[in-house]
Image (tube, rainbow, N blue to C red):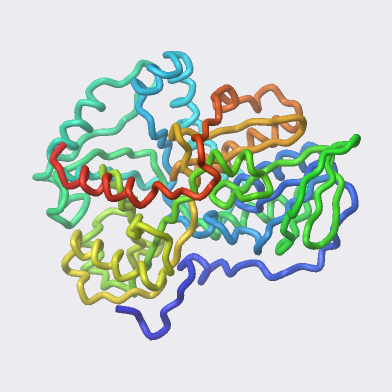
Amino acid sequence: MFTQDFKAQPYWWDRSAPPTEQTTELPKKVDVLIIGAGYTGLHAAIQTARGSRHTLVIDAEHAGWGCSTRNGGQVSNSIKPSFSELEKTHGKDMAFAIHKEGEHSLKFTGDFIREENLDCSYAEVGCFHAAHNSAQYDKLARALDYQVPGLEHDAYMIPRSEQHFELGTDTYFGGAIFPQHASVDPAAYHKGLMGKARDAGASIISCCAAENINRDKSGFSVKTSKGTVQADKVIIATNGYTGSLTPRLQRRVIPIGSYVIATEPVAKELMDKLMPKDRIVSDTRKVVYYYRPSPDRSRIIFGGRVSLRESNPRFSAPKLHQSLTQIFPELEHTKISHSWMGFVAFTFDSLMHVGAEDGLHYAMGYCGSGVGMAGYLGMRMGQQVLGLEQGQTPFNDIKFQTRPLYTGKPWFLAPSLMYYRFMDSLNI
């Protein structure tokens, strides 16, 4: 099952090792303190530092320890609720604005990487969104037949008879191609962002946990594991790792473990058969799988939700491997070289949220679309801190919901996943 040199850590860390601890001294006073050194925090820092604000980014672990280097590297414009669902709850104009933000996040990510010349294997490879049953294929086709004016895209359907041109499996019933979706090496992307933030003048201090936030006359006094720092404004950029430091936000995000494996090297002939194109792949299940070739096409990176409770990646790896071989039986004897997990943050309305309360800013709840959306909303949040009008987003205007008795520990996940798996087994 496992290679001799198996690593219980992200495959991406082989190329971009976690940053080593630096001896940067904690300043006494800053203009902007950012808690969380992932995509959100670093993009916010780039904006505020370039806007001549003295900016400090801190993280409880090493910078990028969370899902910014643990994801599958799939960049999409995914907004989970459909336009019609959003129109019912928020009105037509807001539904349009929200879906437009999804498009903006995808374009922003690609433009930023190109303009800043980041070396992170970014490529617009397109996504094959596979239908796991015939009813879902028909649903995808109907959705593409009617596109909201102003939100048109060039997606198209692939019938089951032509599926092998995209994916060497008979598991699915065809699917939809979204040509503009992209892939990236997530850890290399994060490393590039750290460099740009530091070049702009921001300081980044790893292993510096924020322990308490107090408001005072001059702004905020934040106690950390390395001392106390005064800040005019504070940005919370913790997403799936939001905890008791900010209990109000903790009650509004649902941390969900996402598990990923990398296979050992696969023969070129087999890779060309199974994944003839460099597409990123997802499917229509509620309990979704997502996968792709590695940037050099030597391995398959395969992820999904496989455990009813959070578990050790070494224990989840065989379950993921079983799911992988159900799709590609040819990989039955292919071993696992890496296995890891990270926490994504879902919300009760399946939407991202951005806000501010008396100088305390936040952006979080990317619902599995964080590679593009975290950076985009981090950028917008940085603009908001600078007082720039273009920083405002429709997500600022949506109530950030919670539920009675929910304190941040999602006790309801196990029964919900069992229900979703049952629904996935039906042809509906």
Which quadrant is the N terminus positioned in? bottom left
Report the side of 353 relative to 6 (left or right): right
Q: Is residue 125 above or below residue 258?
A: above
Q: Position of residue 227 (x, y in %)?
A: 85, 59
The residue lying toward the viewer, choosing from 226 and 150, is: 226
Query: Residue lying furthest left in this view?
Result: 161
Q: Say if residue 194 shows up in the picture.
A: yes
Q: Is residue 388 above or below residue 249?
A: above
Report the side of 160 relative to 423 (left or right): left
Q: Residue at x 42, y 65 (%)?
A: 311
Q: Residue at x 61, y 52 (%)?
A: 38
Q: Quadrant of residue 393?
A: top right
Q: Position of residue 161 (x, y in %)?
A: 9, 45
Q: Position of residue 140 (x, y in %)?
A: 22, 33
Query: Residue lying furthest bottom in this view?
Result: 4
Q: Residue at x 46, y 42 (%)?
A: 346
